[in-house]
Image (cartoon, rainbow, N blue to C red):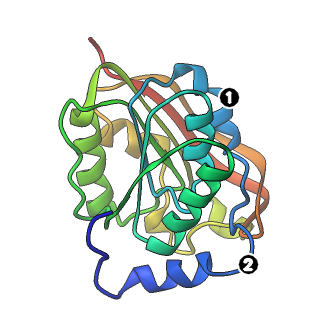
Amino acid sequence: MVEIPAPGPAAMWNARYSEEGFAYGSAPNDFLVERTADLLGPVLSLAEGEGRNGVWLATRGLEVTAVDLSPVGLEKAEALAASHGVHLHTVVADLATYDVAPGAWGSIVAIWCHLPPAERARLFAACVKGLRPGGTLLLESYTPDQIALGTGGPRDPALCMTLAALRDELRGLELVVGREVRRDVHEGRYHEGPSATVQVLGRKPG
């Protein structure tokens, strides 16, 4: 792992991931499962947390690098991977400044990767450059409508995403899937109930 970031937002995530069990469950995200066949290795999984999505992909034979702000979360991710007989490459890093290596990734996964708009735009532009030709980006995030539902996710609408904004931020990708949906999410104690999300699967031409 790289150097642990200075105290800040990491403290909140470390506290959450120090709680008993898995904050968001140990099963993978539904949209990720639905579209796993579209993903290519190596995979970069952003905001991976306790490892449920990365481990799912690793059990499907994909090489996965899991990035998260919380070293506590990634320690649990490594343990979860070991319990399934697979391995994750883990990197402790702040996504506000994380460098996505250009042309290095077959797929990039961003599940509930909620950042301030300027940081998100920088990261997603780097993700487009980071994909190999023919590579895919899979994303699910809450939309601003989620705030009123109160069943998980950010309380600040600026941290949420819309399909219109993502079309702009992911310029250079062809959207195989691009939709805003209402669906029930059952992911541990922090994501539970009717939810407003945006789902994207983008492919880089090549």
Image-based side of 96 in relation to 156, left or right = left
Q: Where is residue 179 in the image (x, y as percent from the top left)?
A: 58, 34
Of the two numbered discs 1 and 2 on the same chain, state the one appearing first in sequence. 2
Cα–Cα span, label 1 and label 2 = 28 Å
Q: Nearer the viewer, residue 143 or 37?
A: 37
Dot 2 falls on a residue whose secondary structure is loop
**Residue contact at pointers 1 and 2, CB within 8 angstroms:** no
Q: Where is residue 94 in the image (x, y as percent from the top left)?
A: 31, 67
Q: Mark 2 points at which residue?
A: 20
Q: Which amino acid does label 1 sit on?
A: Glu
Dot 1 falls on a residue whose secondary structure is helix
Residue 204, above or below 33: above
Q: Where is residue 175 in the image (x, y as percent from the top left)?
A: 44, 24
Q: Quadrant of residue 116?
A: bottom left
Q: In which quarter of the image is the C terminus?
A: top left
> How crowded is the residue under tag 1: few (<14 C-alpha within 10 Å), some, or many (20+)?
few
Q: Residue at x 53, y 20 (%)?
A: 38
Quick check: can you spot residue 144? no
Image label count = 2
Q: Which residue is drawn at 20% across and 41% down?
A: 101
Q: Residue at x 24, y 58 (%)?
A: 98
Q: Residue at x 49, y 64 (%)?
A: 74
Quick check: can you spot residue 8? yes
Discs 1/2, front: 2
Q: Name the residue under label 1.
A: 34
Q: Which amino acid does label 2 sit on?
A: Glu
Q: Nearer the viewer, residue 172 or 69?
A: 69
> How crowded is the residue under tag 2: few (<14 C-alpha within 10 Å), some, or many (20+)?
few
Q: In which quarter of the image is residue 28?
A: top right
Q: Which residue lies furthest to the top in this view?
A: 206
Q: Where is residue 68 in the image (x, y as percent from the top left)?
A: 42, 62
Image-based side of 103 in relation to 29, left or right = left
